[in-house]
Amino acid sequence: MTMSPLSKITLDGRDFLVKRDDKIDKYLSGNKYRKLYTLLNTPKNRYKTIISYGGMQSNAMLAIAAICKVKGWEFLYYTKPLSKKLHSEIEDNLFHSLSLGMKHTEIEFELYRSFVASLSLSNDEYTLVVDQGGAHRSAKEGLEVLADEIRAQNLEVKSVATPSGTGTTALYLALALPEYKVYTTPCVGDVTYLREQMSALAEIPSNLIILEPQKKYHFAKLYDEFYEIYEKLKSAGIEFDLLYAPAMWMALMSQTEESVLYIHSGGVTGNVSMCERYKRRR
Ligand SMILES: *Cc1c(COP(=O)(O)O)cnc(C)c1O
């Protein structure tokens, strides 16, 4: 695997560098590539089946589906029942995952919690359960590889930024890059929740700076200002995801001044279904 390239982007007159982890692979890209690096480098004969669960448009789901396809592993994925809303023909993350061979099962709402809890209990040594969000210590290795790439690119900038869900990516990146400032912002829950998630994995280092969003955003809801900054970035030359990137860019623009290297966290394939939702709303 060669290093992901760098691009420049100008947003409202301010220049940024972007590490193009979105370019790594169509399906296995961004921070899911980094977080699943260890799994990707696991020998084929180690597992027969990978099991996971969560959102029906999850970027992690698609990334795991891509790895299982390459490895020849069976991939079982569980979600709550799909909404009955016109499931159209669009090529969303679920569509791509199914075409990569994922086996999808819907679990009734009432049973979902206990079903998910039971998943890790009943498995043989050739089965791996990947928990939702991938907040796991095994993510460390792939983020050390990213840190090495950033160092090898020998840049003037000494600040990087990447948005957080579980915070796994930002935390391990900050630990692996102590000589850089690492900015992040919570896109799922608030700052307190993000700190809790991170602290469960490791002690939060002082070079990791969590920027507080200016307003309370709910994950996967639609916001005009998110779509606006997405469009601006896109016309400036780079497409970012609509779930995480907008909040990070907004926080960077309002709360930082120095040169920043933005680590593209991928997720662009999820935009088809998000754009569909924004369009329907208009
Ligand atoms: C999963 C994801 C994140 C959040 O990653 P964490 O390690 O859970 O913080 C950010 N951006 C995109 C595009 C993602 O798919």
Image (tube, rainbow, N blue to C red):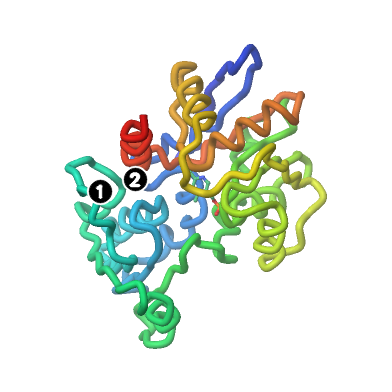
Q: Which residue is mark 1?
A: 96
The answer to whether residue 73 is left or right of residue 25 is left
Q: Which is in the foreground here, disc 1 or disc 2?
A: 1
In the picture, residue 26 is in which quadrant?
A: top left
- Looking at the rendering, in which quadrant would you find the N terminus? top left
Query: Mark 2 = which residue?
Result: 27
Label 1 and label 2: CA atoms lie apart by 8 Å
User: In front here: 193 or 70?
Assistant: 193
The residue at the point 28 percent across, 52 percent down is 94
Give residue 129's quadrant in the image. bottom left
Task: Looking at the picture, tell me which residue is in the foreground, 222 or 94.
Answer: 222
Question: Residue shown at 25%/65% (left/top)?
Answer: 104
Judge: label 1 CB < 8 Å from ligand 1.
Answer: no
Disc 1 residue type (three-letter): His
Disc 2 residue type (three-letter): Tyr
Residue 24, x across and y down, in percent:
41, 39
Residue 58 point in image, percent of width and height: 39, 53
Label 2: element kind: loop
Q: Using the image, determine if residue 214 lies above or below residue 137.
A: above
Q: Secondary structure at mark 1?
A: helix
Position in image of residue 90 (x %, y %): 22, 40
Q: Which mark is residue 16?
A: none
Q: Which quarter of the picture shows residue 122? A: bottom left
Q: Is residue 35 above or below residue 132?
A: above
Would residue 251 be found to the left or right of residue 87 on screen? right
Asked if disc 2 is less than 8 Å from ligand 1, the answer is no
List the single residue furthest toward the top: 13
Mark 2 and mark 1 in contact (Cβ < 8 Å)? yes
Instruction: Give the residue at x 55% y 34%.
Output: 246
Position of residue 87 measured from the top left corner of the image (x, y, whole percent)? 21, 49
- Sooner in the amino-acid sequence: mark 1 or mark 2: 2
